Image (cartoon, rainbow, N blue to C red):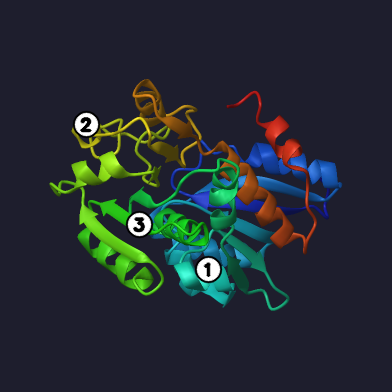
Amino acid sequence: MINSKTSFLALIGNPVNHSLSPIMQNAAIKYLGLNLIYLSIPCKNKDFEMVINSLKKINCVGLNVTIPYKEKVVKHCSEISLVAKKIKAINTLKLNDNLEWNGTNTDVAGLIYPLKKSNLNLRNGIILGSGGAARSAIQGLIDLKVSVITVVSRNEIALANLINDFKHQVSIKGLIFNDLKIQDLINDADLIINTTPVGMVHIEDNEQLPFGINFWNSLHQKTTVYDLIYNPCPTPLLKYCKKKGCETIDGSEMLIAQGIESLAFWTNGLRVPFEIMRDALKDYL
């Protein structure tokens, strides 16, 4: 029950109205018997710094950070975990005793959770997008020993920065989405991960598939396609790929797995069974 001593956790991003994190996190909080509540806070880009600083001054104990702020929030942290330093992206913040943010990234652990169970033959991986989620995807594939990683993006500057940050850790290359080499790469890929918001609920885009339908012409049925979006479930991309005969993975297991890691970070190690969050989401996925 909410009372005068109740503190809160929150998700900030733009958009966040589609997010199921409050549902699963509040179920976990209830299971653990904590005097907390989890909220979602929509935040426009022009308000981001004001919001992130203001939340330190009230009874907020931790945050999740989503699109488009996972990279931007790094400079607002006084301490950063090793994994967050490696990928230069943060999705989870905790307020320390000095009322400063400590940052980490639970997306990497969440992202590889369903892949570790799939026994995939991961040699060639393609990542779509060049934002904070793409950085987590690259690190996840490095952890899974993927041999060659290709990142495809529309943003040349973000793509160049991303490739430069990882070039000493793995065989990685970047291509702009309309490069003619992409069709052969897609045909040969063992795994394609979509980290763009295309296909997400409430995202207005004329293209329901990342980079348009022609981008996917050479997709082979042996390829596994993993969309980090979980709402809607399945996404237009996963519906298309399933018709092509591909194995598909939606973002719901990543959502839950990273949520468990985030809650453990906020509560100094308290954990809930995977089923607690999964069951809370059954009516929403």
Q: CA distance from mark 2 to mark 1?
A: 35 Å
Q: What residue is pinned by disc 2?
A: 217
**Left or right for 255, reference 46:** right
Q: Position of residue 51 (x, y in %)?
A: 52, 60
As drawn, the residue found furthest toward the right would be 33
Please name the amino acid that badge 2 sits on.
Asn
Q: Are marks 2 and 3 in contact (CB under 8 Å)?
A: no
Q: The N terminus is located in which quarter?
A: top right
* SS state under label 1: helix
At x 31% / y 66%, what residue is drawn?
A: 163
Please name the amino acid that badge 3 sits on.
Ile
As drawn, the residue found furthest toward the top would be 243
**Left or right for 133, reference 160:** right
At x 68% / y 47%, what residue is drawn?
A: 38
Q: Nearer the viewer, mark 2 or mark 1?
A: 2
Decide if residue 212 is in sight here. yes
Q: Position of residue 253 (x, y in %)?
A: 59, 40
Q: What residue is pinned by disc 1?
A: 84
Picture quadrant where residue 256 is located: top right
* SS state under label 3: strand
Q: CA distance from mark 3 to mark 1?
A: 20 Å
